[in-house]
């Protein structure tokens, strides 16, 4: 992915022109009537900036010799959980692609043997499962 750099570009993104007609899709023209669609600078700039935003979010510098950068950016962002939400602390969570939320927490029970774990975020619908474990057990469970 690389921004336009052939001597015809400008340094700053121009303000898009007002829409003409109803937004739609490009065509090769309609037999006996409509001329082929013109892909204008606004459409090109919008697509270019969407792709550059993916690279930027993944920390990838644009390189006109690498045609796999968008794929690398998406792969990197999914692997890192970027945009999906995560907190990897002692009480943390990870939102997976598709919306599944994994949460974990740690609490000390003290002498009463009862503890409450406060999850970092609310489950939007319901908790489908829970696993409790004991660490540093002294056999008092």
Image: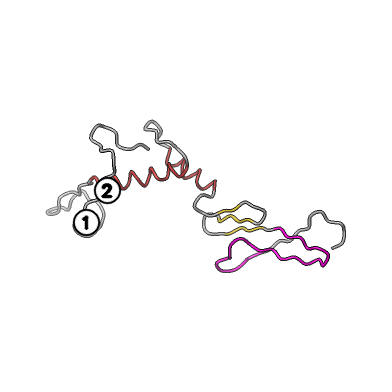
Q: Earlier in the sequence, mark 2 or mark 1?
A: 1
Q: Secondary structure at mark 1?
A: loop
Residue position marked by numbered label 1 in the rendering: 19
Magenta stretch prevailing secondary structure:
loop
Which residue is found at the position 12% from the left and 53% from the top? 32
Q: Quadrant of the C terminus?
A: bottom right
Tell me if 37 is positioned left or right of 128 in this view: left
Relative height, residue 91 to residue 11 (above, below): below
Image coords of residue 51 (percent x, y): 38, 44
Which residue is found at the position 63% from the left and 56% from the top? 92
Tell me how far mark 2 sits from mark 1, CA to CA: 11 Å
Which residues lie in the magenta part?
A: 106-129
Image coords of residue 17 (percent x, y): 22, 52
Q: 120 or 27, which is in the foreground?
A: 120
Q: Which mark is residue 120?
A: none
Q: 60 or 15, which is in the foreground?
A: 15
Image coords of residue 100 (percent x, y): 56, 59
Residue position marked by numbered label 2 in the rendering: 43
Tell me if 68 is positioned left or right of 116 in this view: left
Which image quadrant is residue 130 in?
bottom right
Relative height, residue 92 to residue 51 (above, below): below
Which residue is found at the position 43% from the left and 37% from the top? 68
Question: Is 128 one of the magenta-colored residues?
Answer: yes
How many other residues sit within 10 Å of disc 2, few (<14), some (14-19) or many (≥20)? few
Which residue is found at the position 47% from the left and 40% from the top? 59
Q: Going by the picture, which residue comes out furthest to the left?
A: 32
Q: Are marks 2 and 1 in contact (CB under 8 Å)?
A: no
Which image quadrant is residue 108 in?
bottom right
Q: Quadrant of the N terminus?
A: top left
Q: Secondary structure at mark 2?
A: helix
């Amino acid at each position: 992915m690389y921004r336009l750099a052939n001597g015809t570009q400008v340094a700053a993104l121009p303000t898009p022109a007002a829409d003409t007609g109803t937004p739609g899709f490009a065509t090769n023209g309609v037999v006996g009537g409509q001329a082929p669609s013109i892909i204008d600078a606004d459409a090109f700039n919008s697509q270019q900036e969407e792709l550059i935003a993916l690279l930027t979010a993944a920390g990838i510098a644009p390189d006109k010799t690498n045609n796999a950068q968008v794929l690398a950016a998406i792969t990197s962002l999914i692997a890192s959980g970027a945009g999906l939400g995560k907190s990897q602390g002692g009480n943390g969570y990870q939102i997976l692609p598709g919306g599944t939320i994994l949460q974990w927490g740690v609490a000390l029970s003290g002498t009463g043997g009862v503890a409450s774990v406060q999850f970092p975020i609310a489950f939007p619908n319901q908790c489908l499962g829970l696993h409790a474990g004991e660490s540093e057990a002294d056999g008092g469970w």
